[in-house]
Amino acid sequence: MLARYFKLAEHGTDVRTELLAGLTTFLTMAYIIFVNPSILAEAGMDRGAVFVATCLAAALGTAIMGLYANYPIALAPGMGLNAYFTYGVVLGLGYTWQVALGAVFISGVLFLVLSVLPVREAVVNAIPASLKLAISAGIGLFLGIIALNNAGIIAAHPATLVTLGDVTSVEAVLAALGFFVMVALTALGVPGAVIIAILGVAATGMLLGASEFAGVFSAPPSLAPTFLQMDLAGAFTIGLLAIVFAFLFVDLFDTAGTLVGVSSRAGLLDERGRLPRLRQALVADSTATAAGAALGTSTVTSYIESAAGTNAGGRTGLTAVTVALLFVLAIFFAPLAGSIPPYATAPALLFVACLMTRALTQVDWDDITEYAPAVITAIAMPLTFSIATGIGFGFITFTAVKLLTGRVRELGIAVPILAALFAVRFAYLAIG
């Protein structure tokens, strides 16, 4: 039955290979069940409820991807967007986490609408490649500064804005060692390098008395503190439009890039280099984002870590379904997730930051009208603590330099319109 439904023979695979591939993918991305609750808890959300929401949203989105789109791609709350949710929208701009969840839900619904319309490819292709790459890199830099701060390696300073923290503290030393181990294990090709390092740092911290151990297994915590708590009315305000757009924009292009990248490595693209079931895949992602907001977590997106599973032979949705089932089982590890301190998850944030920042290497560094807007986009995100602001600066800069150099044709229609909207928003904020 499994072989027929997922067309295993057609894809040159079997049940055993798919199950092992699913386990491999899960191990490479399971760190999110520890990291996401830690980040969203700082926004005032109930850590146990967020843990359950994270597992359920990841399981739901991944199951839809496997059963509906038949792709070996897993989903979970996205790194970068969860940090923006907490540090940018809630702590930075002062919105409640309920309003932020409302913005995520609205972005998911808009994403779903775009997914079923025939204009989805046009929307993806309308944005210049340099800006797409810069957004990924900017989110990486944004994560990097958060990671170093959580580890205590950098700290705020009234004169220089940021300075060196107490690098001799137990937390800072353990975070640094965790990052070193994470990178080394990844270089050596060890599956689950990120989660191994996180658990290793947490265990060492407990032995040294820097944190406490709360156990491993228990009944799942209540989902009630976050379930259906999003404030949709509050999210429909003028100030939230750019934030909704940021959630939508990043999720859309991150998902498209991940889908194409992983599918390309796995040989799942058609003869024209396109994804055969793009609509189904985007529907799975957008549905998971809306459902995740209803459950109580930030934007759910496709994970590039899925490439670990395809490298292990995963070729069909059975790999994704396996990952989904493992996320459901993970719900019973709530005490372990609660035992993981911020200094243990900081190395994972920094590690993901490194992976995302390398996107800048693909920018055209021979054309200043391409790399200047890209650099502005990337550095604006961590320095303004806002993904939306970085995107806005990028669009405005790209439009301005193309117009001033007479290269209007390279702008298209979407970019100038978005640049104008962002310019109006910045003017509105300044006047207000």
Image (cartoon, rainbow, N blue to C red):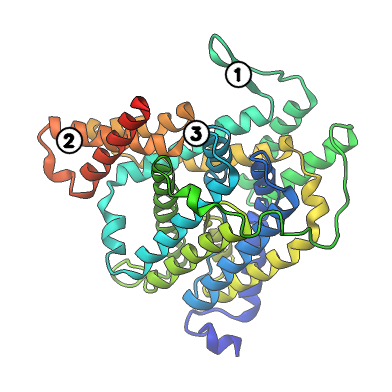
Picture coordinates of residue 89 (x, y %)?
52, 39
Left or right? Give the position of 319 relative to 326: left
Q: CA distance from mark 3 to mark 2?
A: 26 Å
The quarter of the rendered structure image containing the C terminus is top left
Lower position in the chain sequence, tag 2 or tag 1: 1
> Which of the two residues, 284 or 86, is positioned nearer the viewer here?
86
Contact, mark 3 vs mark 2 (Cβ under 8 Å): no
Picture coordinates of residue 32 (x, y %)?
65, 51
Q: Which residue is denoted by mark 1 in the rendering?
A: 156
Q: Nearer the viewer, mark 2 or mark 1?
A: 1
At a point 31% along the width and 63% down the height, the residue shown is: 120
The crowd level at tag 3 (other Cα within 10 Å; few <14, some 14-19, many 20+) is many
Q: Which residue is denoted by mark 3 in the rendering?
A: 141
Q: Regarding mark 2 in the picture, which secondary structure is present there? A: helix
Give the residue type at disc 3: Leu
Left or right? Give the position of 333 relative to 25: right
> Which of the two residues, 65 or 348, is positioned nearer the viewer here?
65
User: Which residue extends farthest left?
Assistant: 406
At a point 40% along the width and 34% down the height, the residue shown is: 389
Give the residue type at disc 1: Ala
Contact, mark 2 vs mark 1 (Cβ under 8 Å): no
Q: Regarding mark 3 in the picture, which secondary structure is present there? A: helix
Q: Which residue is denoted by mark 2 in the rendering?
A: 402
The quarter of the rendered structure image containing the N terminus is bottom right
